[in-house]
Image: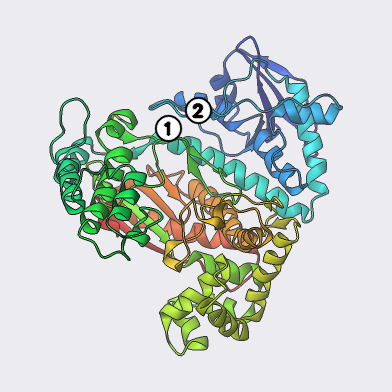
Amino acid sequence: MADRWALALAEDGGVQLAPLGQDGLPAGPVRWEADLARAVRERPDVTRWVWRSTSEVYPALLATGVRVERCYDIEDAETLLLGHEGRYGEPRSAAAALARLRGGPVPPDPPQRSAEPGAQSSLFEPQVTHLPLTDLLDIYAEQQRRHDRAEHPDRMRLLTAAESAGMLVAAEMNATGLPWRADVHREVLHDLLGERYAGGGEPRRLAELTDEISAAFGRRVRPDLPADVVKAFAQAGIKVTSTRRWELESVDHPAVKPLIEYKKLYRIWTAHGWSWLQDWVRDGRFRPEFLAGGTVSGRWVTNGGGGLQIPKVIRRAVVADPGWRLVVADADQMEPRVLAAISRDPGLMEVAGRGTDLYQSVSERAFSGDRDQAKLAVLGAIYGQTSGDGLKNLAALRRRFPRAVAYVDEAARAGEEGRLVRTWLGRTCPPAAGASDDAPEEAGIPQDPDHPYHTSTNSRARGRFARNFVVQGSAADWTLLLLAALRQNLSSLAAELVFFQHDEVIVHCPTEETDKVTTAIHHSAALAAHLTFGDTPVRFPFTTAAVECYADAK
C-alpha cells in the first residue's frame, strides 16, 4: 500500500482520494468515499496526505478524533515557492496556482476574515468551487518541479515539509486550547482594575487615574486619547510628540507616573479584560487561532484573541488541569546561536557549542567581560543597531567573529540593493520588505510599529530588515522542525502541545510525564538543529520549568 495519498473534498460532500508513487504521480485510480474521517481513519499506513489546505481539511478530522502523521499543504507550498521565485504577494490559492499552470487568468485570493471568538475555521473565506483531485495532482506535480529548480532543492523541500508540519501543529493547538481559569482571570482583573461600572465604562481604577492625571494638568484630560494628552503637555509648556512610554519617562511632570500606569492598565482592560474573557475562553480553554508562518519571516501569529501577547500578570490565569503540569520551555539565546549556525563562523560556533551563557562567553572574547556590551553588540549586529556605540561594538565583534558579521552585512547589502534574501532553508524575503515585528526592545531598538524602521521603504530600512530576516527567518525554520519533532516524540504520551511563540513552547501533561516531556524537548531541539543546519557544534539548549501556573515559570 502507498504511504502517500492525495485527498480532495468533493462538491457532493464526499472526498476523492488516490495513492501516490515515489515520483509523486498517481499510483492507482481516483476513488470516491462519502465520509472524510472514515476515509482517513481506514488508511492508518498513510504517512503523508497531500491536500489543498490544512485549514480546510484538518479541523474536521480533529473534530472526529482523527490525527494524521504528516501532510503536504498545496497552498502553503505555493506561498513559499512564489516567495522563492521573487513573486511574493501574487495570489497563492490553489485556484491561482492552477490558472498559472494552465495559462489562464489568475484569480485573486479570497479576502482574509477576522476570527470569530470560539470559532475554528479557515483563515480565508470559503471558496465557492471545489478543486477536483486531478487538478490538485497537476499542481502538486508542478510544485515538485519548481522545488527541483530552487537554489537548494533539498533545503527547500525540507522547508515545505516543515511548514506543512507546522500547519498540523497549529490546527491541533487550536483544537486543544490553552488551559485557562476564568475565575482566576476575574480575580486578577478585579485586583488590577477594581469594580466594573454599569454600562461598560472604565473600571474604578482607571477612573481614579483619569482624575489624578486631570488634576495634575489642571483640566479635564482623556488619557485614552493621545492627542488630548499631547495637547495637555503643550499647554503645560512641555513638548512631546507621542504618549509612548519611552518618551513620557523623559518628562518631569506629575502627570507622568499616573499616565504610565493608566496606559498599562488600559491595555489590559481593552486587550484582556472581561469582554475578552467572555469572547475567547470556553470550557476552561483559550483557543486563539494559531497561524503558522503568518509573517514574512515565518514567525507565527494568531488570528484574533491576541494569543501571542499575553501580559505576564494575566498569565496567572493559565493554570494546568488538576493532576497535570505545564512544561514551559524557553530557547536560550536563540538568535546568536542561529547566526553561528548559518554563518559557519568558527569562533561563534565554538562559543554557541558550550553549555554556558553565550553572551558571557562573547564578552570574555571581545568585550573584557562586559556581558551587557556583548549582548548589545550581538543583537545590534542582527537587528541593525550599527551607529554610535553600536558601530564601535560592531567593530569589536567583527574582529573576533568576522564571518558572522560578514553574513548579516551581506544580507543587509542585498536588501538595500533590492536583491532576494533567503533563510538557510530558502524562505525568501521580498525585495521591498514592509513592516517587521521582530526587533526586540531588549536590544535597545524600537519595537514601535510607527517607528520609521517598520514603515520606511528606503534602502537603508530594507537593509536592516534583510539583516534581521536571515537570522529570524532561519530561527523560524528551525522552530518548525522542533515542533514537528516534538509532536512526534509526544505522540505516545498523554501530553499535549498547547502554546508556541517564537522561542517558547508550552506542553500540558500529567504530572508523571513531566520528565519525559522535558527530555523530549531537548531531544527535539537537537534533532531540529541537525536537520536544519547540518553537522555543526552549535547547541540549542532550553530552559524548562514544570509548573502549575504559567506565571510561575518566569
- Look at the numbered discs 1 and 2 and tell me whether their residues touch, using CB distance below 8 Å: yes
- Within-10-Å neighbours for mark 2: few <14, some 14–19, many 20+: many
Q: Is residue 13 left or right of residue 185?
A: right
| Kind of residue indicated by mark 2 | Pro
Question: How does the figure colour the protein chain or chains?
Answer: rainbow
Amino acid, disc 1: Ala
**With respect to residue 473, does 198 lie above or below?**
above
In the image, is residue 121 above or below residue 222? above
Q: Residue 403: x and y, percent?
A: 67, 77
Q: Which residue is mark 2?
A: 59
Q: Quadrant of the C terminus?
A: bottom left
- Dot 1 corresponds to which residue? 175
**Which numbered marker is on residue 13?**
none
Q: Do we see residue 179 in this rendering? A: no
> Going by the image, does 122 lie left or right of 360?
right
Q: Residue furthest bottom?
A: 368
Is 438 displayed left or right of 142 in the figure? left
Q: Secondary structure at mark 2?
A: helix
Q: Position of residue 255 (x, y in %)?
A: 22, 56
Name the foreground residue: 357 vs 327. 357
Q: Quadrant of residue 216?
A: bottom left
- Label 1 crowd (10 A; few <14 / some 14-19 / many >=20): many
Q: CA distance from mark 1 to mark 2?
A: 7 Å
